[in-house]
Image (cartoon, rainbow, N blue to C red):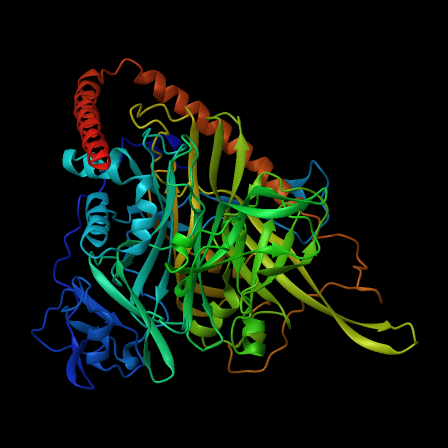
Amino acid sequence: MVSMVLLFSQLLKYDDGTIIDTLAKAQAVVLPSKLILGVGSGSFVEGDELPWTGKILLPAGYAFDESTIRSHLEGTKSADWPILQIPEKDIVVGPVLQLSAFANHESIPLFHSGKEAGEDNCDEELFLEMDKLKVDERVTIPGNFEHILKILIEELDEYKDPYYEETSPLFLTHLRTQLKTGMTNHFWFRLSGSSVWLKDHSVHLVISRFLFSASRSRDGPKASFVLAQVFDKEWRELKDVRLVFPTNNLGEGSPTFKVGEQDFYSYRFPRILPVPFHHDKGRTGNRYYGPEDPRVVIVKNKNGYEEPVVIVNAKHHKIVKEDDEDKDKEFRSIFTCFPFQIKRGKEHVNAKLEKATDNIVYTNIVEMNILHRKKLGTSKNWSPFVSENLRVVDGHDKYLYFATQLENLEILQCDITDGLGECECVYKNDGGIGPMRGGSPLLNVNTLLKEQTKFPLSMLLPPGREVFVAFARAHLNNCGCGSKFYRPNLMVLTKDQSTYMTTGEDGTITEATKTFFKVSHISGFFSLHVPIDPWYLDRPYGMCEGVNAVIPNGISAWNIDSLGVSEGHWKADDKLTLAFSVSDFSVDRINLQGILDALLNADDGTLFLQPPVAGPSQQTIQSFISQPMVDNFGHLIAGDVGFNGRNVKCAIEKCYGFCARFGEEAEALADEHKNKDNSEAKKEFNRKLKEFEEALREEERKQKQNEEN
């Protein structure tokens, strides 16, 4: 096992501005009224080198008229930028992972759900081992705060961006002083980053939480925003780019433009997405505002194209009836945010209407509410996923599912097509939330296999089964290192259906179907060989002071380079990119190799079918995996074997041992460096901070004087 001491590091050095060097060459595509260049992954025009920054990116598959685009962009920084569009033939379903220098990951315990297990026999009955995984090195996804915030100021001052005008009282005076004194990195923080691949634009869309904290404390921010950045297929940031995307029409006066019957809108990236949230312009002192913990997934909407959906939680106000009186109450709720859809006003996040915001165009967000249940004061850590089987039936993603609890599993099915945010609980085990919490969205393995392999799903999975994979994280309190301790846990969720005959009140016998979910497999902690940054950044060896956290946020890509059969076993060459944050301070990614291969060949044999002996071209007898057995009322006949969450409890128990060992080594390292002299660095920082505070007081004095005049 890799010594955990090797996983410690000094403070990360963050990018001050990634230079985009020679980018992809371009292929010319003739569109109406102009030669427009398309950035492709296939053929290229020799000698053409095309940096994407300062360009307008159109989605593939639409015949745009340049004059319409120019008219739409009149009065923006992008009005005269060159226009690019990827040819349809060059669309790729997912990005190809770059070459990686993989190293062996230490063995990871994996607990299955195929047997009954008591309190003390996890290792004897449910224990499996993943011992062939490989891991690459941690890579920070760039984010130059000064550049991002200068674009914000430019859009506010020169182009009167309505969203920035509405929210800027929370931070504007402070920000102007930060930019003058070079102190932005001490008051802004970026974390909880995840990404999706926009195939029609051939770019990664990275979504993260962007915090402003006047106190320089990232766990006590004044405001929280959703930051969106765009990267090319090789993870080079497009530092100033405009994306045009399909959207909805707001009726008379809509800011969109049409191509045929389809409306389009655009944003300049990087930008803070115009997500509406409740605030009072910062007049209430220490309260904080805005959307938190963003996670992003791709859905196929009813118009037939794919779009991102961002899931956040946020404080908001609602008028509720209590004791026959209408009361204004605060809630923290889950919202689905559709970055490529728009909506006027923010009445859906404020109890009291604000006429000043009625005509501001925001991204469309919808509050998620569980039918037939009293609304909770706080909702967090809902893990979203999409059903491939229902997509095939409906032709699009009518529903978004959420796993709201993992140890005592609860699954919601939420309609995302009607705009009402209605969720129905479709599966529930008794019990509360527990220490195992949601991390990344769940990726549908059925979709992955369908899009990337030649094997039909019937050769890999029993009828009706869907398999979803995510990285959760156990939340451990005072476990041997820090007040809270988090690391990623690999989680497999299965969805099965059982058909049974039921008798109605009139004696009629009919066929019914019952859906069952379970956490079929879950691992202990992954170290990922990730260097751990301290919670208090000025104490680089105090790893167990405050929170010690590596939190998974999303699976950015999962490539199956090959899938076949070798010596009676499945043989998959697969690589997965995981997005994560360290100590609520970073947005990182790392590549893992062998996750799918390990799951296909898990020794319990309850997840995937055994492979054919002679390959997929011949009809062979397949192995059998039983579906849940139910009685005439749809209740499990075999009791709760596999559905009681015992394997999740086993994983949590194993995580406590990891934390204790980590704490012992962290304490030894802290003792070794306890006399390290950081006084000069602290003096220099305090000098800069004093200069900033003096400049801020002067800026506030000038602002007050201007208001009085």
Direction from residue 146 to residue 413 in the image, left or right: right
Give whichever of 81, 640 is nearer the camera.
81
* Relative image position of residue 206 (x, y in whole percent): 33, 55
Q: Is residue 20 above or below residue 326?
A: below
Locate residue 692, reporting x and y percent: 19, 28
> Quick one: which residue is furthest to the left in this view?
47
Rendered view: 401 above or below 622: above
Q: Position of residue 576 (x, y in %)?
A: 39, 57
Q: Nearer the viewer, residue 32 or 352?
A: 352
Most extreme residue toward the front, as rendered? 709
Q: Quadrant for the C terminus, please.
A: top left
- Quarter of the rendering containing residue 201: bottom left
Report the side of 508 relative to 650 (left or right).
Answer: right
**Splitting the image into 4 quarters, where does residue 61 fall?**
bottom left
Residue drawn at x 51%, y 64% is: 444
Above-or-below relation of 367 to 548: below
Residue positioned 67% across, 57% down in the render: 371
Q: Nearest the camera: 561 or 509?
A: 509
Q: Quadrant of the N terminus?
A: top left
Q: Nearer the viewer, residue 329 or 606?
A: 329
The residue shown at (15%, 33%) is: 181
Q: Is residue 316 left or right of residue 48?
A: right
Would you place residue 275 above or below residue 305 in this image?
Answer: above
Total marks shown come to 0
Q: Which residue is farthest top? A: 675
Is residue 104 visible from the viewing direction of this image?
no
**Residue 689 visible in the displayed image:** yes
